[in-house]
Amino acid sequence: MGPKSRVSACKKETGRWQKAGEEAARNWELLTANRGESLGLRPATQTFAGLPAEVTKEQGEIMTQSAPVAEAAISAESMRGPVAGAESTGETVLGGGPKYDLRRRPRVAESLIQGFLFLCGAISILTTLGIVYVLGRESLLFFANEEVNLLKFFGGTEWQPAISRFGIWPLVTATLMASLIAMAVALPMGLCIAIYLSEYAGQRTRSVLKPILEVLAGIPTVVYGYFALTFMTPFLRGILGRDIVEIYNTASAGIVIGILVIPLVSSMSEDALSAVPGSLRQASYGLGATRLETAVRIVLPAALSGVAAAFIVAISRAIGETMIVAIAAGAGPNFTFSPFRAAETMTGHIVRISGGDLSYDSIDYNSIFAIGLLLFLMTLSLNILSQWIVRRFREEYE
Amino acid sequence: MALDQRQTATQPAGGLMPSGPAYREQVVTRQRRGRRWAIIFQAAMLSGIIALCALLFNILNQSFGYVAIINNIDPAELAIDGVPLDELTKDQLVGILEANVSAGLMRRYEHDMPFAQRTSENVHELILERVVEPQVQATWGLFESVFARGSVFAEAEERFPGSDVYFRSWLTTSFISKSQSSEPLRAGVRTAIFGSLWVVAITILFSFPIGVGAAIYLEEYAHKERLINRLIQTNINNLAGVPSIIYGMLGLAIFVRILEVFTSGAFLGIGDQSTANGRTIISAGLTLGLLILPLIIINGQEAIRAVPNSLRQAGFGLGATHWQVIWHHVLPSAMPGILTGTILAISRAIGETAPLVVVGASTFIALDPSGPFSKFTVLPIQIYQWTSRPQDEFRNLAAAAILVLLVLLLTMNASAVLLRNHFDRGQANA
């Protein structure tokens, strides 16, 4: 698309109010043409007799609409200005007064600005297209490789690119295990914190506690990774014994991911709980329910869609979490179901492979994009699911 | 209880209101359950706070503490006529250096920077580096160092006889002002801080105008019912949930590889031609820019939506064009909200590690970055590198670097709050 056609495309989008103005202008041209004829150049025809009334009516409607439309209406109205004999008839909304040429001029700069702003918005679509293109293209190259096929990819339980074993399962199980542990920590804790903040804590307590959770949410993930390796792992090893827990293990990574997503779960759930109208709580108290019964049986079900959405977003976040598992979970694909053994997750594998010397178009390079595509699809479908749940199951109380 | 008595007084047994010992017992049970769960909810909140405290404690604990060091040559032996090493003149120091290192090394130092121009601190450092050669044997945390001093000294004496045990703060001014080094005692984070600042500058330059522009388009121009605008909106919401590492892969494929000519600086003939590839500051900045763009757009949209419509209508009423209304009225009153959102997005960008590892931050950089086309490392990457090393002393360095990073983030967030308060007051006065 050339710049010229882009400008015209943007012009087209300037909206209904412009069109209304243009239409009014066109009508006016017809009208003046008719008036010229009626001045004696040609005999007037009956066809245009009703037009002035129609135009005024249309303009009247336009005037009652929103501000941009009003501008169009004014410019249409002001076109009467320079036409001889029209300005003093009292037909104009603005009345008589000094005669300026107030006709709407085509504003190139405004259209250019709007076009630029549209492009800014379109960059987000380009980003998505870029992600899909990049991941798709490199994954296709990966699967085009003769050593790889979909069956091996989804059926194999060994990921050793060096000896061309490309079974995704070790990475997927480690990812799911870490996410599962994280959810076992974050969901109950996050929900309890949300219920406490929304139903139990007073205004002052909340104003102190919420910033603390925000601090927790603002700490970079690499710091959490450090915490997992230097605090959580020795802690677990101290409790369970050094023979059971390896130095790198998915359990400590998973627990710390859980701590990381607690603020996400609690703030999203608390928003949902707070949005439940107070009348519901008062009705419940009026029937003699305790605070706990009100919170759990009345408020929570009413906010369930929001809470469920928070849970799903948290799962998606845990699956995509990278630095914690890269530091604390281990550096080698390992098909195991023990949370105390070292195992590499999908994200951890991508970071480790791309952190080394990576030559383009090697099978390693292509393979991380295939893993990335799987990761992208997993998180995207979870995000879409959470949006769908909010839309589908939201209880409206107003 | 009072309710119960009234019931028995006014109503016959078997009336509408429940009563009786079984009922009373049930009420007591329910209330007890309520109290128990209230404690559980509070405990959950408390354990969240404890987790935060444990995290901060762990980092502080690792940043300070005793170290056991064994020197190749004891600095006391290098003293001349009883004058300790620190107080010797420059000429004496050069003499010590000459006596202890090879002639080739001396020539290299002379070549790097003539001794005549070096300060005595610089020569002193060279002596420490080449002659004294301190080696860290073991480190202890702050907690042990304060509460179990005796056992620390005993352990050091037993395991590392002849070692020099002293209290060391890993976070010092020289840690901030020195560039990277493979020696833990002399390593610093200056290159990483400069790298972070450069990358974030590029990120802001890229994502702030585009993010605000997109927010303006979506809130002020776009017709919500049109397909393309709905698509953009849904798309932005979904992009905000894409894992950051995916952005790193996007940056690797697009900025580093496809646009290598531009991001390596080759099209301008500048940049480091010997290792010319796209793994430069500008690639990293653009990648992080794409990453925080959805956050800036969503925050900006909220800020613009909060501007009262009367302001716009007043502008239109005075005959302003659409853009004049936006530029002179909507944007100034939405700016505090937009800036707050932007600063929060940028503090996310500063802490982001995974995408930059994928884009290809360098692992070891001793020179400050000189421009957008130089190779780079950033603070989180530095922390990641040091954490991945098995030696304890690098963990201490990582903890000190984390403190620097957290202070940086805290400053940014505090400035966001101050900025918001400042603008709010300005609005109230106006």
Image (tube, helix red, strand yellow):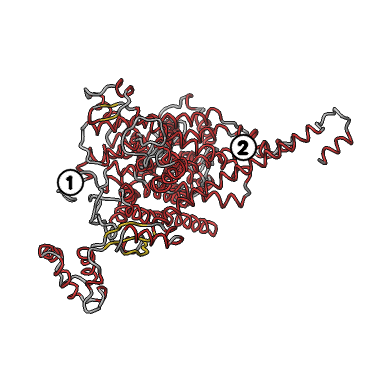
Q: Which mark is residue B397?
A: none
**Residue placed most toward the observer, B118 or A129:** B118
Closer-to-camera residue (A11/A134): A134
Label 1 sits on residue:
B276
Report the disc number at residue A276: 2
Q: For the residue carrying disc 2, how many other residues have a C-alpha within 10 Å: few (<14), some (14-19), or many (20+)?
A: some
Percent x, y of residue A119: 35, 39
Amino acid carrying label 1: it is: Ala
Q: Seen in the image, is A347 located left or right of residue A312?
A: left
Front residue (pair A332, B145): B145
Is the residue B168 above or below the residue B10 in the image? below
Q: CB of mark 1 within 8 Å of CB of mark 2?
A: no
Query: Which residue is at 35% across, 65% downward?
Result: B166
Q: Is residue B304 left or right of residue B78?
A: right
In which quadrant will I find the N terminus of chain B? top right
Is B395 left or right of A68, judged from the image as shown? left
Residue situated furthest bottom in the rendering: B81
Q: Is residue A306 left or right of residue B25?
A: left
Residue B205 in percent (x, y) is at 33, 49
Across and down, in percent, residue A318 comes to 43, 37
| x and y, in percent, of residue A194 in the image | 57, 41
Q: Which chain hosts label 1?
A: B
Q: Residue at x 63, y 40 (%)?
A: B37
- The chain containing the residue under callout 2 comes to A
Q: Residue furthest front?
A: B158
Rendered image quadrant of residue B429: bottom right
Q: Is residue B247 above or below residue A138?
A: below
> Which residue appears farthest toward the top when viewing the image?
A151
